[in-house]
Image (spheres, coloured by chain):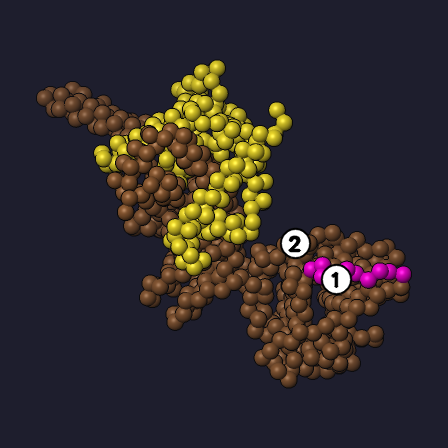
Chain colours: A brown, B yellow
Amino acid sequence: MVMTLDDLILKYADDRASLSEEELDALIAGLRAAPERAVQLRQHLLVDDLVSQKLAFDRRNFPAQVQQRIADYERGEVEIQNQVVELRTLAESPLETAAGRGRDTAWWKISLAVAVLFLVVFAAIAPQFGSRTRISATVESAQSATVLQAKAGEALLVPGQVVATGQAITTAAGGSLKLRFVDRTLLEIGPDSVVTLDTDGDTRGKLVRLDRGGLIADVSKQRAGEPMLFATPHAVATVLGTRLRLSVDGLATRLDVLEGRVELRRRADQQTLLVSTNESGVAAIDNLALHELRWPDNRTGMIFLYDGNSEQTLVRSPQQPEVLHITRLEFTGLPNTSPPAADVGHLDLRSGYFHSSEAGDDLLPLFRATNELSLEVVFRADAQPAAVADSSLLPIIALADASAANFMLAEQENELVFQLSLAANSALRQIRLGRVGASRTHHLSLAFRSGQLNAWLDGRPLLDTADIRGSFAHWQPQELQIGGAAGDQAAWRGSIAAIALYNRCLTESELERNRRNYAQIHVPQ
Amino acid sequence: MDRTPQKSDFDRIVRETSAHIRAYIAGIGVPQSDVDDIAQDVYVELYRFYDRIPPDVSPKQWLKGIARNLCLNYFRRTSRRGRLQREALVELMLRAEQAGPTALAEGPVREALDGCYEQLSPDNRKLLKLKYEQELSSNAIAEKLSSTSEAVRIALFRIRASLKACILGSLAAEPQ
């Protein structure tokens, strides 16, 4: 089929490498005969690249890539200079001891001259080969993280230390580590993790082995043909430039892509999955699955959900515990106030409060069945008015009525307080969680079972205690209340973007995953 | 030893010129996957020999000269037959640069593109995201959209042509 100049231009503009030699000849001849078409084609190529610069993930931070190349160049110059000086010194030193020896002296001088000449030539051409086989990273921050060194054994890592290929890194429970590679790629290694830096034998690209635990990576654009690999016992993820989260437990590897695209390959059968932004790929022994990132992630035990972004309020009914039903929160407005606007993506508690007896009735038996409770709430507190704030308990969310509460999260004098009823005829156990700043969005997570209560604010631990013991067997039917009244004013002023309640004590990693998923998916208030 | 520039000056040059230089390299015919590698080489060369820039030459002009040379070196690394063809195309594109309007090579072209991009229809933006964000080939896009690769190529060509017209219009309307 004979292609017209238009066809050839179209094909070339789409993919420079797609034309055969004959087609290239035809294109060149056509453009020579019609120079104005060459102008048009060139402008088309300019716009094509400008759009690519705008949209392609791995092309967005070009100035940072240039900075890294400059840093590589400067470090290479210094390293080569130092190596040449060291090797010259080493090569020249035998001359002093060989002086005075007879016919061997000339041979030594010639040999050393050749060696020095070789070193100079090597120093001149060495930059072309670079240092791609050496993978090292610098510690930016470390907490309870150690590295296993060949002769020195296990040593604590400190900021500024360099970790190199083959060294196994371990973080303790509650530990963390940030590593920065030469190309600005950042690894944040989570608690209870085992990681080893390595080089891929085929591509010479960076290889990070994650045997246990989790990490978050912000991967700079890698050189063509040298993707960065993340290998776990179950899968291999191939990355050219993106942000991702990777976690491993005994059964599966989970890859969350926060920006960009990553190929996930399951080791067992080499099946692959392309995971894109806000998607999650799971590679297990018997499964390779893809789904959207969501909040909350694992919904086992979730019994109530308010998600402002989707304007949904769901509750699990004890009669049909396998299903979440849509439920409605009633609003009670306060005197001389206007009702809040609808569909704004959050519950506005400045002019009243929300409540539901129906939800309270559903939640009570579910809590009593397990005696466990977890709570997530995304909220933004206003500066509380002085008339209400002084030593008053300002309820944020509670299972309560006018006289008593099964549980309550409240604010008191700018501090978060959690109250829990743990035995009949006993006072509420009150636990102070810590100060909370006004006028910014916070994500509170809390998990309780008898003998364990943990709380985190924005991922930062607030409380870890084994002193709280009891059950919910005595709990009475009460309303689910969000906000409250103090006379004719709102008790607690602010807004709530999301609430999740569980009748299960979630783990720290589950709650932290939920918090990160929420931040990734939802636009903050 | 060659004098290297002040970091703030160098960073400013990179910030102000990189969009144009990268597009310039693409306009010579370098495949998109290699544009940024060559562009980075250009800035490393600028950094190494900064004091060789004549006082009456702007950094952008100097950068274009470096880019031209590096692009020619790039095409020389291909096979002989392919090299001759690529060099012929480079010559045509360089002549086209001289003959065509300069607006796309100057001025706040990225800002103009941002504004023009927002004016595209959602379908057109979706097509561009499939092509540039997800880096799908025209064949893969066609499969995803139940279309043909030819139709996809034509649609992309038309979208880019409309963006070009919009960008040129925005730049012409810029106050002098």
Tag 1's secondary structure? loop
| Residue at the disc numbered 1 | A342
Q: Position of residue B43 (x, y in %)?
A: 43, 30
Look at the numbered discs 2 and 1 and tell me whether their residues touch, using CB distance below 8 Å.
no
Please name whichever residue, A343 or A480, is drawn nearer the observer in this view of the structure: A343
Sequence-wise first label, 2 or 1: 1
Magenta stretch in the rendered image: A336-346
**Residue at x 57%, y 41% (from the top left corner):** B116
Q: Is residue A435 magenta?
A: no
Q: Callout 1 environment at 10 Å: few (<14), some (14 to 19), or many (20+)?
A: few
Name the disc covering residue A502, or none: none
Q: Position of residue A184 (x, y in %)?
A: 47, 42
Please name whichever residue, A3 or A229, is drawn nearer the observer in this view of the structure: A3
Q: Position of residue A346 (x, y in %)?
A: 71, 60
| Residue at the disc numbered 2 | A524
Can you see residue B48?
no
Disc 2 chain ID: A
* Type of secondary structure dominating the magenta stretch: loop
Looking at the rendered image, the quarter that the N terminus of chain B falls into is top left
**Residue at x 37%, y 35% (from the top left corner):** B29
Q: Is residue B9 above or below residue B23?
A: above
